[in-house]
Image (cartoon, grey):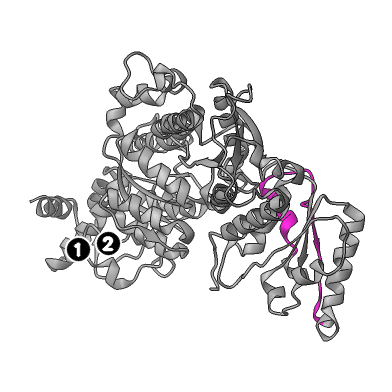
Amino acid sequence: MELTLWTYEGPPHVGALRVAASMEGVHLVLHAPQGDTYADLLFTMIERRGRRPPVTYTTFQARDLGGDTAELVKRSIAEAAERFQPEALLVGESCTAELIQDQPAALAQGMGLGDLPVVGLELPAYSKKENWGAAETFYQLVRSLLKGQMPPPGQPKPEPTRWRQEGRRPRVNLLGPTLLGFRCRDDVREISRLLAEHGIDVSVVAPLGARPADLQRLPSADLNVCLYPELAGPVCSWLERSFGMATVRTVPIGIGATAAFLRELHGLLGLELPAELEPGAGGVSEAERRSRLPWYSRSVDSTYLTGKRVFIFGDASHAIAAARVATQELGFQVVGLGSYSRELAREVRAAAAELGLEALISDDYLAVEAAMAAAAPELVLGTQMERHSAKRLGIPCAVISTPLHVQDVPARQAPQMGWEGANELFDAWVHPLMMGLEEHLIGMFRHDFEFVEGHRSHLGGAPAAEATGANTVPAETSGVSAAAATASPAAAPTSGAVDAALAWTPDGEAQLARIPFFVRGKVRRNTERYARDHGLSAISEEVLFDAKAHYSA
């Protein structure tokens, strides 16, 4: 565990909270001190839910440590079971309580709570994190509730096409969505509607909105859809091994992936593939009917986006999908790809290798910020942390992944998956670039009487920095070493620290301000490097042009 200002994931008990709060009829007893009882804020402030999460804390204090805290755990469990009458009880401990070694899960198992299913959670807080904790909680809950339905060894695996013999429509489970996930509620609605249009029913959505009884119905579906591998991957693999249930693992984010998802689904279920989903089929495809992205990608206007440099960082599923959409559907150039999801690091590295990149696998936001600055992108696709870093670097950013803030949980429907999700991606990614172009034009004509302060776009907000063309990330907080800052013109991170021996003249600053914001930082660095190499102390308009000619040669 490392002390840091920001973190991409909380400890694993936060993942357990997410699963418990996402379900109905489930209660979590968490052995935790008073300082770890902050779950209410997570769900009421960020998710804007009108009810508290279903969690009971032991809330031990310093004076309790001299006594028997195990009795406090048992009393809390008994009171929670009697008061809330849950259909399943989860028992775990926070990172602080883990140090006491009271073993609340073992205590709960020996309390004799009757027919109430009690699931003990082992959540190693000092080696694992939030997404792992959510996946482990979901996995242990499903295993516990389905242990009585385990088929005997040697029993033939059920065929995904058995719906034909049973005279019904095919049905599938959607696994992985939770609260505090990225647009999970909207994704579920969009994918459910998409499946219904293709004659496929949704049997169970879990954990989001499911009850323990619903989890017991999981094997009755024909196959599982692993919507979010970070959370549902272990459950899908276990259901495949234990019940022989096939799994659709294509994550339907983007035009190509949505079409591939539907083709995989139809193939496993034995459904006839519609002609408009056939690869290379003539006529108007389903994507053409349902999304504006294919049309725009062929339009003249889209040439403005072609080759735009994009830096991507987030959870593994969304980062990999964003890289595919950016390169294959929008014509961007991905100049950086990374994730904080260490459990899926292999998949991220493989996706980066296909793009000729080395993946950045890190949970240090300063290292991510340094890599972002070095890549000099024109657009950042990341988490709320990359949004803050990009703002300091003067780069447009769209949030594509958790961790998120309340502004990334819209009251309106804004899915990431399916055809409508492709429209949402198109809007969220293209608009920052278009606003950046507008910002540049306003900057060029800012002396015109028509372009007053009221005409500034949302990308404005740092007048002093814009007047000089400088970026505003302090060198001491950017996570960039001095050696990295002077390594090369193209790779040097942007810094607001100005060389004391250099001074920009007014005509030099004016010329620099005419350069588009997304390359202005690189031009400034190259020009200052040129001036240092040639022993110049003042950077005028003429020096800027000389530097441009030097590096263009």
In the orientation shown, which residue stands out farthest toward the left? 553
Report whether residue 499 is seen: no
Give the mark toward the camera: 1 or 2: 2
Q: Which residue is mark 2?
A: 492
Question: Which image quadrant: the N terminus?
Answer: bottom right
> Disc 1 residue type?
Arg
Quarter where residue 516 is shown: top left
Are the two marked residues, 1 and 2, in contact with CB atoms closer than 8 angstroms?
yes
Residue 419 horizontal side relative to residue 545, left or right:
right
Alpha carbons under labels 1 and 2: distance apart: 10 Å
Q: Which residues are magenta?
A: 37-62
Q: Is residue 505 above or below residue 411?
A: below
Seen as rendered, the residue at the extreme bottom is 66
Residue 238 spot, x, y in % from top left: 57, 52
Mark 2 element type: loop
Q: Nearer the viewer, residue 33 or 447?
A: 33
Left or right of residue 435: residue 221? right
Q: Is residue 344 above or below residue 198?
A: below
For label 1, the SS is helix
The answer to whether residue 395 is magenta is: no
Which residue does the numbered mark 1 point to in the structure image?
529
From the viewer's perspective, tell me whether residue 184 is left or right of residue 342. right
Question: Could you say where residue 352 lies in the image, as x and y percent from the top left?
Answer: 32, 52
- For the residue pair 96 and 243, the one nearer the viewer reads as 243
Is the residue 62 above or below the residue 534 in the image? Answer: below
Q: For the residue marked with disc 2, what is the amino acid? A: Ala
The image position of residue 487, as x and y in percent, is: 23, 67
Residue 74 visible in image:
yes
- Residue 41 lies in the magenta stretch: yes
Q: Earlier in the sequence, mark 1 or mark 2?
A: 2
Who's the residue at 29% across and 40% down the image?
308
